[in-house]
Each structure stands twice: as structure tokens, then as C-alpha cells.
Image (cartoon, coloured by chain):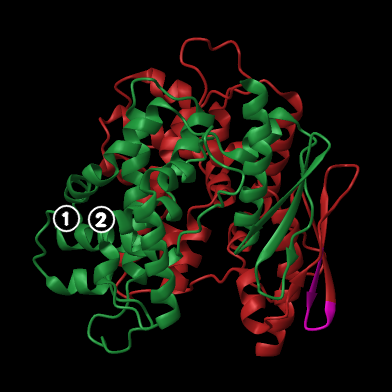
Chain colours: A red, B green
Amino acid sequence: SIGYSFKDKSHIVKAFTHSSYYDNTITGCYQRLEFLGDAVLDYLITRYIFEDKKEFNPGELTDLRQALVNNSYFGCLAVKYCFHKYLKYLSCTGMGIIDAFDKKFKSNEKEIIYGHFLLINENETEQSEDVEVPKILGDIFESVAGAIYLDSGFSLDAVWKVYYPLIKSELEYFSENVPLHPIRMLYEADEKTKFEKAIVLDSKRVIVNLWFRGELYEGEGRNTKFAKIVAAKKAVKTIAKVAV
Amino acid sequence: SIGYSFKDKSHIVKAFTHSSYYDNTITGCYQRLEFLGDAVLDYLITRYIFEDKKEFNPGELTDLRQALVNNSYFGCLAVKYCFHKYLKYLSCTGMGIIDAFDKKFKSNEKEIIYGHFLLINENETEQSEDVEVPKILGDIFESVAGAIYLDSGFSLDAVWKVYYPLIKSELEYFSENVPLHPIRMLYEADEKTKFEKAIVLDSKRVIVNLWFRGELYEGEGRNTKFAKIVAAKKAVKTIAKVAV
């Protein structure tokens, strides 16, 4: 239980209804609530990190917000707090991908969440691959926030009361240890850092090659953004090693 | 006057102080306030368009927010309401660019604002170029919102009371006439729409070629994003003509 009791149950039903779920013709799908919840969470988290006594500089604020208001991070939390058990979604392939992520996540919760925050774990093996979080999971984490906001008569406090406990541990940890975006880290270390043009495979997956300090790094992902981050994370490890 | 009286004047001084302005060592520059104001305006505008009785679909909400919570649009408003007269900015080139934009804007206010919203004006000549809005103008429109928010003790109502009148006319007009993002329009009209790799000129300006329905369109701008939009706007006109 998330600790909020809905006055109008249709709000929470809608928050969990994917557009594929034609059976529910009464409430419609979660997309409008997701749009609303995204803005509400963005505002609440931005306010929280702005008020931090350390008075983060603008670059730190940007990196923190990018890490904390983030579909992949929200997707991890959706699985952690079992939001996906309530999802109404008519796609066997889709549900299979979600279940597979659920299993993977439960087997190594901390590393996946922290890995998302781009920390360089010394113990991480070369083989550890980047885990892609199904987008639909982050979506419902946002749509439920939108549903609470709407149901409570546009109360930001009502949303924060439910969501703050869910994000508290990363909020506190990463406010102490501001994550740096790997692509930004590379440009700061070497302004000649350069991504080559993305290559789209027949499987629709994307490969991006990255030049950093004269070395070539390859990243693969479901889109260009992910592929770039995967390549950048490989290259960033070389900075971390040098720093040690 | 914007109709808000600051309890602590240092907030508004900070909101207008660019990081180049070393003279002001007391308040620091506007970047943290810009970060805060951006989130506040995003939330307030999102809430407004979400509550619209027409119940926009998710695509319309996304397009509206993208058009309304937008550095270029905010920059137009900063000049319209003379925010730039208070800017503390130590760069002659920079100030020259702002003055030039100010003159251009005053000569054709409506077309520039509406052009930003990507409307296809039938009377627009082939030569009419896309006007680039200096980023610093949008920044101070946001930082002043951040300053009011902070000065009023985190009151969203205080910000909305000042900002709603400033954005009211576009908010109402574009809620009636939802702008479509030109790039999205092209993909909706022809899913084989394709941008070629950006070419960076010696002048740092960027050229992007776009293939749409077998025709080539060229866009030029200060970065890839602008160059793509310029190319897309050219191509979009062919759809509009066909539709007429």
C-alpha cells in the first residue's frame, strides 16, 4: 500500500491502464495522468534539491535533477514498490519484458538503481551490462503521482507525502554524492570527445562509436541516447581509474 | 512594473545578474534562480493546460507544453516586457545581439511570437528568415519567476499572479489552436522523413539537410536543433499548401 486512499477510484484505475487495454473504456488510459505526474514530480524534486543547505551550483542542480527526475529511475522504483502488479496492459511480449526486468531487478536491486546513477563501482565486472528499464514502468510511476494530485484536489503536499518516502534514500544519498552525467564528464575531461553517427541495426538496436582521448568505445542500446550513454560509461571508467 | 514588490531586493538583483558581471560579488548570478523558475513555470503552465475543458490528448498536451515552456518564447516575452533593460551583463557583443533582437522584435512582434509557435502564415515570404532569440533573454524570464517564488516564501500563487497576465494571450490563443511541432508533423505525414548528419561550418553555425517526400530541404542555425527546425519548417509549408 502506498498510504493514500482515493476518494474517486477511477483515478487510480486510469493511472494503471495502458492504451492497449481496450477492455477499460470507462476511464481511458494513463497518458494524461503521466503528463501531469511528470510535471508534479519534477517540481517537487527540483524544489527539494534547490533548498538543500549545500546550495548546489547550477551544474550540480542540473545533474541531480536529470538523475532523479528520470524515466529509468522511476521505472526501478515502480518495480521496487510493485506498481507493475496492478498494470493493465494487453501485450504478452510487453508483460514478458516487464517480468524479466522485475526478476533482474530483484536479483540486484542496489546495483541497478545505483548503476542508473552512473556511479562507477570498483567491483563492477567488465561483463556487467547496462540494464534497460521498460519505459512503461517509469510512466506508471508518474501517472500514479498524477492520479493522487488530481484526486486530492491538486494538492502537491498529498503527492509529496506519498512519494517522498519512496525516493528518500536516493534523494539523500545523491544529494551527498552528486552524480555526474557521463557524457558531460567526458567533455569536461577532453573537449575533443566525439560521437560518430549512430548505426541502426536490422534489429532496430543502435550502435554508437565514441572517440575519447584517442581511444574508440562502442555503445549499443535501444536508441541513440542509450547507446551514447553505454559508450560514455565505458570511457568514463578510464577517467575513474586514472583518478584512483 | 511587473506588479510584485520584493521584500528582499537582493532576489531581483540576482535574477538580473549574468555570471559575466563580476562587479556584483554580493548576490551571485541568476543561474540557480533560472533553474528554479524553469521548474515553477513548467509546473504552472502544465497545470493550466491540463485543466483546460477541452481535455487535450497526450500529444496535444506535449506539443502545447513544448511551445509554451520554451526558452525562445520566454525570450520574446522578456523583450516584450522590457526585462532586458535591467540585465547586468558584461559583454558588448552579447548586448549588441540583444539590442538587435529587441529592434527586430519591436518591428514585427506578432509575427515573431507566432512564428515561434510554428504557425504557417500564408503571407510569409520565402525570404522571411527564422529569428533566433538570444538564450539569455529566456533565462532571465525564468530567473525572475524564481526570484518571486523565493521572495514570496515559495508561493506558486504569487508567481502565477505576475506571470499569468504576461502569457495570457498566447496561452488562450494556442489552447484554441494547438501548435504542432514541425518535425512531428513531418513524421506523421511521411514516416520515411530523414535528417542527414549535421554539418558544422567554420563559423560554428550548423547546416542540416532533411529528406521529406523525396525532396531535400536545408536548414541553418546556431545549433543542430535550430537547423533541424528551420529545415522542418520549410518542408512543413508544402504540407500546408497541399492541405489548402
Q: Which residue is drawn at 27% across and 38% down?
A: B168
SS at mark 2 in the image: loop
Reply above or below: A216 against A43. Answer: below
Q: Are marks 2 and 1 in contact (CB under 8 Å)?
A: yes
Could you tell me what secondary structure mostly forms the magenta stretch? strand
Three-letter residue code for mark 2: Tyr
Over which residues does the magenta segment extend?
A209-215
x and y, in percent, of residue B140 in the image: 33, 64
Three-letter residue code for mark 1: Ile
User: Could you tell me how many numbered marks the image carries?
Assistant: 2
Q: Residue at x 31, y 27 (%)?
A: A151
Residue corresponding to mark 2:
B81
Q: Residue at x 41, y 36 (%)?
A: A36
Q: Is residue A165 visible?
A: no
Reply above or below: B50 against B6. Answer: above
Nearest-to-viewer mark from 2 and 1: 2
Mark 2 to mark 1 CA distance (whole Å): 8 Å
SS at mark 1 in the image: loop
Observer-nearest of B228 and B64:
B228
Q: On the image, which quarter does residue B87 sit in? A: bottom left
Say if labels 2 and 1 share a chain. yes
x and y, in percent, of residue B75 in the image: 38, 57
Q: Is residue B16 visible?
A: yes
Q: Does the magenta stretch include residue B51?
A: no
Give the side of residue B71 with respect to residue B11, left or right. Answer: right
Dot 2: within a 10 Å radius of its alpha carbon, few (fewer than 14), some, or many (20 or more) residues? few
Observer-nearest of B211 and B92:
B92
Q: Does the magenta stretch include residue A211?
A: yes
x and y, in percent, of residue A164 in the image: 36, 50
Q: Which of marks 2 and 1 is nearer the N terminus?
A: 1
Residue corresponding to mark 1:
B2
